[in-house]
Image (cartoon, helix red, strand yellow):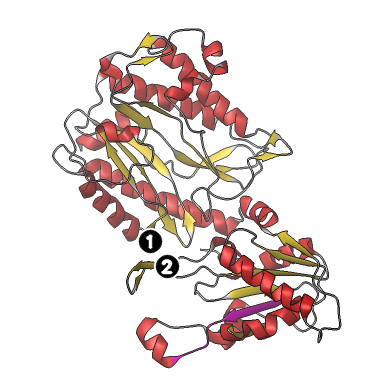
Amino acid sequence: MRAINFAARRKKLMQWMGPNSIAILPAAEEKVRSHDVNFPFRQDNNFWYLTGFNEPEAVMVLIPGRKQAEFILFNREKDITQERWHGKRLGQDGAIEQLGADDAFPIEDIDDILPGLMEGRDRIYFALGANSEFDHKVMEWRSELMTSPAKRTGSPGELIDIGHHLHDMRLVKSAPEVQRIRHAAKASAKAHIELMKACAPGKTERDLETELHYHFAKGGCRYPAYPSIIASGENANILHYIENSDELKDGDLLLVDAGGEFEHYASDISRTIPVNGTYSTEQAALYDLVLEAQLAAIEMVKPGNHWDHIHNKAVEVLTKGLVELKILKGDPDDLIKRGVYREFYMHKTGHWLGLDVHDVGDYHLHGEPRVLEPGMVLTVEPALYIPQNMTRVNGSNIAKKWRGIGIRIEDDILVTSKGYDILSKDVPKARDEIERLMAG
């Protein structure tokens, strides 16, 4: 696996920041799970993107053009007793040797040192609004400079949110990043396949969640990238269902939306399979419609196209199909114009993918949809949801045979110079392939 060049990222960000500026970013905080037990630590993605450092209680500082040190890290000191209880710490020497920091100081000294680093800078960049407590700390340091009679130079000027530009940097992935997302997708694909093989009436959603997470871990993805959705029957019509506790019933569908995380990078895959291994006539008709919409939407993924091309194509195919199945009545163009399809399909057709499963980056620039570029990674996930209580839409009765069905099909797509690469293509999604796999 190719190494990630964190130094190049910092250099690129500092070039954008320009001279006489400073960027200050904190690490994530440890979160209490219960009493004296914490959740497993997960580093802030912006902080990790620029440092590769995976400890809490740290602050990164970038000062472009500063001769003494451009990249400074405040982090925990080495402590034999604490390390014996809670694990190794990198310390200040380790931050310089392993992370490439120009200088490093104990985190306890930040109040004494950081205001001096801010002094006289025209611009202070930080993740405004991401951590209100840290925002307040930055304001305190700035205020100290403004009110201290001992300071002989100017106080810092503008306070600027660094998020917009940093998120733009994160949007286009490097080759090492794509490698990690591809690995996460391949490991997750294997887990989805094993889940399909294990699925059977009488098992529970939790049984299959266990199967899935076991194969995530076996493939190098210790943690899921997000809470796994294992939704059978009517549960599939709850978009973010995560209870995963019900029994699987013969004749129902099972919607699985789950992906593993590999070295901080996420995958995100959805498949909808028959619990008993065979789609009913109505399930097959709706499934084929969603798959047709997904395949058509994926064809819209290429440089020069934009987000609306992908979503609009999925909506077009889904609406036309609902009319052909007599679930909706009317002219498809008119139904799309009036947004009637949203009764069955209320979310967008995808999202950015990377360090976050719903990764950062603007979807619109200057009021226009974002144009796709090589290196961007996104999901394509059309769906149809027809809950049991949906009896009438747009003046049309919904036949009982369609109700209680929820279907979503999702893949991870890399934008390439010539079009696209489906990173999660190892998971079957054609009906006949899924049925053959489940039949053994």
Q: Which residues are magenta?
A: 71-79
Left or right position of 157 against 311: right
Q: Measured along the vertical axis of the image, is residue 377 above or below residue 297?
A: below
The residue closer to the viewer here, 316 or 404, is: 404
Instruction: Residue at 48%, 28% (x, y): give it.
Output: 295
Instruction: Residue at 35%, 22% (x, y): give it.
Output: 286
For the image shown, how many numbered marks are present on the structure? Answer: 2
Q: Residue furthest right?
A: 153
Determine which quarter of the picture holds residue 232.
top left
Q: Which residue is mark 2?
A: 31
Q: Are the residues tagged 1 and 2 within 8 Å (C-beta)? A: no
Q: Which residue is mark 1?
A: 220
Left or right position of 14 against 426: right
Instruction: Residue at 64%, 44% (x, y): give it.
Output: 362
Left or right position of 210 against 340: left
Few, some or many residues within 10 Å of mark 1 (<14, 14–19, 20+): some
